[in-house]
Amino acid sequence: MENKQIYINLFKQVEKLKNSKDPKRKYEYILWLGKKLKVPNSNILIQENKVQGCVSEVFVKATFQDGKLYWEGYSDALITKGLLAFLICGMNELTPKEVVNINNKFIEDTGLKASLTPSRSNGFLNILLKMQSQANDFLSE
């Protein structure tokens, strides 16, 4: 992963998964993250914040404060909630430009493809794309 200093939290998350050779352990870690995700403010559960292309219901919203983005999200499925938590943890406190410039290759680096169904894997990417789209909106303000 490029720019380890900028993306230190995301890098740590990717390394944790990368260093686990057991697909079951990776899956358990994602489930654990999902259980830890804070319950969001219910006002984020609107169409504008909904992630398209996910089998489950997924919502994510960025707030902009002091030049950084802070994320909250919700999913009705635990594994998707874990993937969302992974991204939120990894991308919290980045600038909009940093989020927009993330290379999605890190998803492959996690090694999660072996543990996820194709629809979950696609959903993971769709969550990232939604977050990047929201970050991009802050760039144009």
Image (cartoon, rainbow, N blue to C red):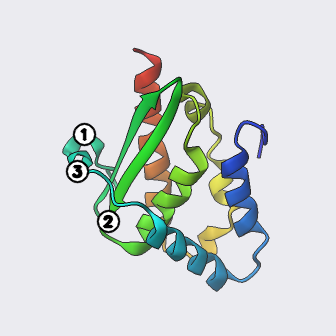
Question: Where's residue 119, x and y in %?
Answer: 43, 67
**Direction from residue 126 to residue 54 in the image, left or right:** left
Callout 1 touching callout 2 (CB < 8 Å): no
Q: Amino acid at mark 2?
A: Val
Q: Describe the element under mark 3 as helix, strand or loop.
A: loop
Q: Amino acid at mark 3?
A: Leu
Q: What's the CA distance linking mark 3 and mark 1?
A: 8 Å
Q: Nearer the viewer, mark 1 or mark 2?
A: 1
Front residue of this view, candidates 60 and 43? 43
What residue would you read off at disc 3?
45
Residue extending furthest toward the front: 66
The reply to whether residue 119 is visible in this rendering is: no
Which of pointers 2 and 3 lies earlier in the amino acid sequence?
3
Q: Amino acid at mark 1?
A: Glu
Question: Where's residue 92, x and y in %?
Answer: 55, 43
Q: Is residue 122 above or below residue 2?
A: below
What residue would you read off at disc 2?
55
Question: Where's residue 71, x and y in %?
Answer: 44, 44
What residue would you read off at disc 1?
48
**Direction from residue 4 to residue 73 in the image, left or right:** left
Image point (78%, 38%), residue name: 5
Q: What's the CA distance linking mark 1 and mark 2?
A: 17 Å
Image point (24%, 39%), residue name: 48
Q: Nearer the viewer, mark 3 or mark 1?
A: 3
Image point (40%, 38%), residue name: 62
Which of pointers 1 and 2 lies earlier in the amino acid sequence?
1
Q: Residues within 10 Å of mark 2 (few under 14, many from 20)?
A: few
